[in-house]
Image: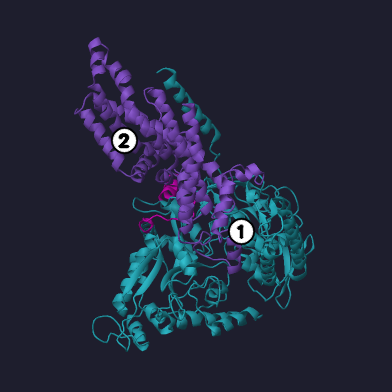
Chain colours: A cyan, B purple
Amino acid sequence: MGMRTILPILLLVGLLIGAVMLDRPQPPADLTFINRGEVHSLDPQRMSWLQDFRIADALYEGLVNYDNDTFEIVPGVAETWTVSPDGLTYTFHLRDNAKWSNGDPVTAQDFAYSWRRALFPDTVAGYADLFFKIKGGRAFFDWRVKQLQDFAGRAAGVDDAARLKLAQQMLEEALQRYEQTVGVDAVDPHTLVVTLDVPTPYMLDLLAFGPFKPVHRPTVEPYLHLDAASGAFRQHYGWTKPPLLVSNGPYVLTVWRYMRDLRMERNPYYWNSAAVQSDSVVCIAVEDANTAVLAYETGTIDWLSDVGVDYRADMLAQKQRYMDRNAARYQELCDQGKSYNEAMEILAHESPPQPGERNDIHAFAAYGTYFYNFNCQPTLNGGEFNPFKDARIRRAFARAVDKQAIVERVTRMNQPVANVLIPPGSIAGFEGAKGIGYDPAKARSELAEAGWEDRDGDGYVEDAAGQRFPTVEILFPSVAEHKSIAQAIAHMWERTLGVKCRLREEETKVQAAHLQEHDFMVSRGNWYGDYGDPTTFLDLDRTGNSNNDRNYSNPVFDELMNQADMELDPVKRMKILEEADAMMVNEEVPILPLFHQVTLYMYDPAKLRNISTHPRLTQYLWELKVVK
Amino acid sequence: MIAMLIRRLLQVPVILLVIYTVTFTLAWLLPGNPLEREGRRPDVAVQDAMKAQYNLDKPLTFYVSYLDQASGLAWLRGDSEKVFNLGPCLQYQDWSTNELIGGALPVSIVLGIVALVFAVTIGLASGIVGAVRPGSWMDVATLLIALLGISLPSFVIGTALLIVFAVWFEFVHVAHWGSPRDLLLPALTLSLPFAAYIARLTRLGMIDVLQSDFIRTARAKGVSETRIVLRHALKVAFLPVLSYLGPAAAYVMTGSFVVEKVFNVPGLGQHFVNSVLNKDLFVIMGIVLTYSTMLVLFNLAVDVMYRWVDPRIEFA
């Protein structure tokens, strides 16, 4: 054998040593955590996922920030600002010492440029519609879409060079039009004037949100090119990788490896660097829920921001045992004015968890609701009869669901039961309606009012002509939790109302496409609010809204929402929105809310400081601190 | 030999084209919209702009332009900077499929090689032990282990190993990748089913060979039993193992989705499964092309090695 055996072995060993040498692990960071999933994009204008926004908040700073505890608006890059009496014009004064991570000053032009990117359909910004509040924003976006559609006709039959020339001309025309028609004006490097189409009382709230954060123009521009095929400009996203990415927030990006890890280090140029608690933050990507919990248990990470394991209900029960044992002391600490985190930290030192207890899992109210959609179209997509076009039937079905039983025995997470879409108490100044709860007797009587009763005593309801109620098909994504809930609800409807139900389980992507096409009878839905205003939830029921899966349309409701858009007096505006909300959750019920979402975190209360308990799920990484 | 190699290499593009076409058709027919996702949906105009950008509204354009970019033709013409441009990643917009495969494939290959070394070592050793004394307690023991290795799913073995070595003994880190120690558990988990199969192959082959005439001759000549087993018998009994190693090598280096998930190994298997779930067309096509190229080349390599080990074999 001789060489024949040794050569391949030598090759293998060499290859291995080489590969291992190339792949050195990172030094440990001050804070290590697992995000809700891998980051999709670090381009603020193109983001739309919570985990992306969490990293964006650490890398970029917008004009304003949220206060982590109260969620009030506090200054960011803008030191001060004024709002005109009609609520339409915002003037921001940017601070002198705001700098990019390469030392360049952050200017009003940077913001104007970044927002312009969002309003160009070429950028395909997922949150472009938030910029439609700006004067001329919607009109410009639609105009450019039309212009690009015309490109195909105008450029027919010419070669690429001529097409590129035409695309360039059209782009210049578009830029000119943008300057003239859209209400964003960088008056000087430190003054930005924003004009709106309609007064938007939550505008500042939006400005603290990821898509309104600035990008560094000289870094982005080299990655743009005109596309001869479509006439649009396209971007290559190489600039979001380290060490190219230039940011203006608390951190700079130093490592980003797909589905592995992302590392950020303190940005020395950040004006408020003194407030940054950790010098380095590492976010590791873990796909498997169980591995993520093990990573926390073995000390690899300090904070697990989403607990997805099946046994989480049992972990919560262990936490409950700990809280029950320390109930008196916890109450005492709360009475002294201690926050949840402060009280838990003191308890952790005074009374460590005993076997069978734990104090490191934490359930916080989230700004979202788990619900069921009723298809509200006159007929189903195939032209079949749709019973749920009738609000009485929707109400009857809503009253027949025992939500308490679902959170206690199906999810076993004891989420707050929801009769309304907007989580109560989550928006200051908004007093939501009560909604309708579990009431089987009323459910049956309301169904009878709509003409459906059990006339022949076979246990199923029929109409006056003796026709049985159509089989109710429940569409849900193929996930164990959604399936159990669908089974429970189907059982409740069959038992309480005397209707037949059928489950329709589909792959997540497929189900999402069917939702958009309104191709369902009843379906599972979910919504998290984006900003602190009722419209972030109520817009779902507006005619033609891109997230109106139910295809619900009600001119009276639309009119109320339009009125609210134009109302200047914030108190009056909230009253109108309360009226619209009551109409949806008490009368019309296109959405059947089941429970409000809860966020589960794992962290040691004696070690990790400053986790925000605010329902909006925003966590400023730079405020978190690990006590070693 | 050389002519054979050239002929086989010329077949590669044809095979790949067929695979590409079939995969493309299947992936395109998958229900669901790749840009659709759970949660908030952008404005309709934004959605249309997204579709148009990636040719997701024109299957034929997509088919031709992707083939052009991925095959290197565009690069030959000077229209593309990258030789093999496998396209953008639809779900993770900041990444290209090239970057994604470039980061994950080396990890999968390293893990695969170590697993293969484990599999061959464990498999040969227990196969030989079983063959030398068939029916002994050692034979039964290795048979039992092989049975467990084949029948227990790797997420059970993997999780058990993690709990023992990471949680109880704290010998390895969870969800950590980059040091040689991180390789051990995933490679072991990945190797077990292969080790079990190799053990059975070796044992059967050895029992067969040990009864053949030339072994009897060797024994008659007074050659030591160790030398008979390791030098004479093993050389022949190894041939079926070798032919099994080709597909096995391709499999361990590419298809270890479950093991990658349990140990959080940043390899290619996860990306492949996720890309199908996300209907991420560019990534599906890119990974399928990479996998099939590897598979075709591995099989070719095994054929060449076969001849090297056993010169009696002629190529048709």
Chain of the residue under label 1: B
Circle on res. B197 = 2
Picture quadrant of residue A544:
bottom right
Q: Secondary structure at mark 1?
A: helix
Residue that appears at 37% across and 32% down: B243
A613 above or below A421? above
Give percent across and percent down for residue A257.
56, 45
Of pointers 2 and 1, the one earlier in the residue sequence: 1
Q: Is residue B216 left or right of residue A323?
A: left
Task: Give the distance between the C-alpha atoms of the residues marked 2 and 1, in whole angstroms.
Answer: 48 Å
Check the image and name the residue furthest to the left: B135
- In percent of width and height, residue B187 lies at 41, 36
In depth, the one of B224 and B178 nearer the eye is: B224
Question: In the rendered structure, the residue with mark 2 lies on which chain?
Answer: B
Looking at the rendered image, the quarter that the C terminus of chain B falls into is top left
Q: Residues within 10 Å of mark 1 (few under 14, many from 20)?
A: some
Does A303 lie within the magenta span? yes
**Residue farthest toward the top in the current orientation of the protein:** B221
Q: Quadrant of residue A29?
A: top right
Residue drawn where x is 35% and y is 57% of the image = A314
Please name the residue that numbered disc 1 is placed on: B53
Write the residue at 39% across / 23% down: B309
Give the magenta range: A290-314
